[in-house]
Image (cartoon, grey):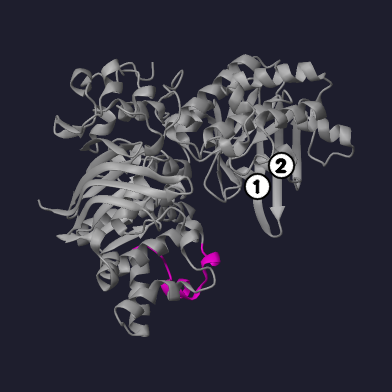
Amino acid sequence: MSSLLEVRDLTVALAMDSGPREVITGTSLEISAGEAMGLVGESGSGKSMTAKAIARLLPDGAKVTGSVIFDGTDVLSLSGDALLKHRAEVAVVFQDPRAHINPVRRISDFMTESLRILDDVPRTEAVRKAAAALEEVGIDDPAKRLRQFPHELSGGMLQRVMIATALLSEPRLLLADECTTALDVTTQAEVMAILDDLRRDRGLSMLFITHDLELAGAVCDRTCVMYAGQIVETSVASRLHEDPLHPYSAALVQARPDITSTADRLVAIPGRPVSAFEAPSGCRFAPRCPHAQESCRAHEQILTGLDGGLVRCERATDLRGTLLDGAHV
Amino acid sequence: MVRMSETSIPATTSTEVEPVLSVRGLRKVFGTQVAVDDLSFDLLPGRSVAIVGESGSGKTTVARMIVGLEKATAGTIIACGRDRSKPARRGAERKLRGREVQIVFQDPYSSLDPRQSGANLIDEVLRVHHDHDSAARTRIVGELADIVGLDRRQIHAMPRALSGGQRQRVAIARALATAPRVLILDESVAALDVSIQAQVLNVLADIRDERGISYVLISHDLAVVRQLTEDALVMQRGVVVEQGRTVDILDNPQHDYTQMLRASVPGPGWKPQRMRERLKSAQAAAAKP
């Protein structure tokens, strides 16, 4: 399978008052057509910034190096109409729908704006398409919803409006940034079912950003785990829970309470997650890692292949298969 | 199918233990909307009860009524042997209620005064509620910081210098400063990162073991509910649809709604399904004679 999206050695530094601050360091990932890639990590790990770099939505003054190739096109050099076309092919859905919709415009205006302006679709035709898209995400009575304002819709309903809108431009890649985090579990299951169907029917590719390992494991084909701006592990999604390769992935799995059993004590990770610019030299996870040795702190860790996955840990081969031992004792 | 509180009082403790919190027939109506309808439960010292449900189920309204931020339309709330269903008449009564039941809210970013350090905040609570001298207050601030795992620098820092997990620990330490018998945790760990959430959950378990405090956990996260509570109530649109031991509810849910909630939680082998439609048709089928 050839890749639809290829991110190579992406490094991003944001402009802060105190000078540039690195948020992503040397990130590489590939997504094939129809593939769902999970991107898992805690706050500050750089997962949202990766999505923003791919969609070219980084804040002003951001310094970007490396490359983002979407369907053969170099995304980082796009401008003008080509950039607009790129944003139609790569749609983004964020966590909080209310922060990304104009509260004083009707749903129909919001949904049809890009169709009418970018694609010159006549108004009635655009509204018809919007109604069909709403039906596709399981919204009853779309004609009524289109006449309503954002405040008249619940959070779950509005998030489905956002997804329907994102899909109106018939994107080939959907960047879903914690798009179900604020939803109730039942609504989350529904939204995921909708996305699953769309992937099957349209061959939509997805970069699914979440902090929920169980969710990523259940809906993605492969998962990348990010820590302090670096990808520390890439492997088949279902594997993350059973046989993680990186100590951080294992620590995340163990720290999460289990719905099927009560742990006497959760295996907490000491310290707090750090951003790329605060990270120590050598292995960035070393200060919190129970397996860290002198040499981990001395060397920059390199992403290497292991058991069909990729892992950024020099001890990975030694530790292979033992990382979940002693979990939930 | 629906079990009421009379049958769900845990059998593990002797009947002589007085519940620290006893809620009977609690009801809240906003205009024509019934937010909470006929809710009853008992909470014994050192035990924890979860109130589970989706947004709009009324779970936070229950918490607000127990703390006294909302007046119950009907029903009684008895905490530490005193009825708190009606608003306090005197300041002393209000303070007493504040001492007995405390709450930790969801958002650690908006629940602290940005111009007060944690130590300052706790000191203020101690001055209002207890009669300690300055040396004793300093000592208690130090003890509370230890309990929640904050070092000297962190407890004296302004909230803006702290991470979300650290702020939530400050909020927990502040709540503990009155030495409450009941602590209400309203989605208190929901906004935290996985690794920090585990730390805070462990801290909460330790506090309960050491102080015999009781928790009312308001949460939509069933794994967290399992980790921290023995008993649980499941609410749907203001009504308790299932009530009993947490383990039983999660491993063997009886009500359609609880089953749907449980089935919506991703795990190994989970496939997303359009649950709501299934529940609607199931409930429609059940409604037919």
Please, what secondary structure does the residue beneath circle 2 have?
helix
Say if mark 1 contacts mark 2, CB within 8 Å: yes
The residue that mark 2 highlights is B65
Up-down relation of residue B120 to residue B152 (above or below): below
Q: Position of residue A117 (x, y in %)?
A: 35, 79
Up-down relation of residue B195 to residue B211 (above or below): below
Q: Amino acid at mark 1?
A: Val
Residue drawn where x is 18% and y is 21% of the image: A317
Of tags 1 and 2, which is closer to the observer?
Answer: 2
Please, what secondary structure does the residue beneath circle 1 have?
strand
Residue B184, by quadrant, is top right
The residue that mark 1 highlights is B36
Q: Position of residue A2 (x, y in %)?
A: 10, 53
Residue A193 visible in the shown view: no
Residue drawn where x is 48% and y is 38% of the image: B221
Q: Counting residues from the N terminus, which is met first, the one under dot 1 or under dot 2?
A: 1
* Chain containing mark 1: B
Residue A109, by quadrant, is bottom left
Q: Amino acid at mark 2?
A: Met
Residue A53: in magenta span: no
